[in-house]
Amino acid sequence: MNSNNYMELSFKAISINEGFARVAVASFCVQLNPSVDEINDIKTSVSEAVTNCIVHAYPNKKNGQVFIRAEIINDTIEITISDKGIGISDIQKAREPFWTSKPSEERSGMGFTVMESFMDHVEVFKNTQGGVSVKMTKRIDCLKSAIGG
């Protein structure tokens, strides 16, 4: 498959940048003419993935960085959100609903579940140089969006 367009971002892993990530990816997706529901699904999923990087990847809260690559391939948006943090020891366990590594911080443990419910496909894998990547894809029904249906 050939890429029609892509963008890449990196930013400091701090909470204030989660909103920036949501808006940046949503703005990039507009060229596919998504419905309001589709854009909200994407924004929510990006928010969950970026928040996971900020909260879990960098426990010392110093010099952490989040990386985003969004790519449009035909009528599909593919978004990869990565970090170079401490990683996840058991990815399958972390994907279980309500499981959290920080119960003392009242985390719900629903981040991956939310991503999976709003996106067509979610893949989580360890990076070779440390950290984790979350790759999410969503097909945008361009024709339906274009006619307001």
Image: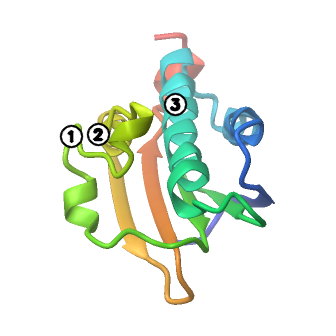
The colour scheme of the drawn protein is rainbow
Residue at x 48% of width, y 18% of height: 37
Q: Is residue 61 above or below residue 36?
A: below
In the picture of the structure, the residue carrying the numbered disc 1 is 97
> Could you tell which of marks 2 and 1 lies nearer the N-terminus?
1
Mark pair 2, 1: CA separation? 6 Å
Q: Is residue 146 above or below residue 102?
A: above
> Could you tell which of marks 2 and 3 lies nearer the N-terminus?
3
Q: Mark 1 or mark 3, which is nearer to you?
A: 1
Provide the secondary structure element on which disc 1 rests: loop
In the picture of the structure, the residue carrying the numbered disc 3 is 44
In the picture of the structure, the residue carrying the numbered disc 2 is 113
- Give, as a three-letter code, the residue at label 3: Thr
Residue at x 75% of width, y 63% of height: 62
Q: Residues within 10 Å of mark 1 (few under 14, many from 20)?
A: some
Question: Which quadrant is home to the C terminus?
Answer: top left
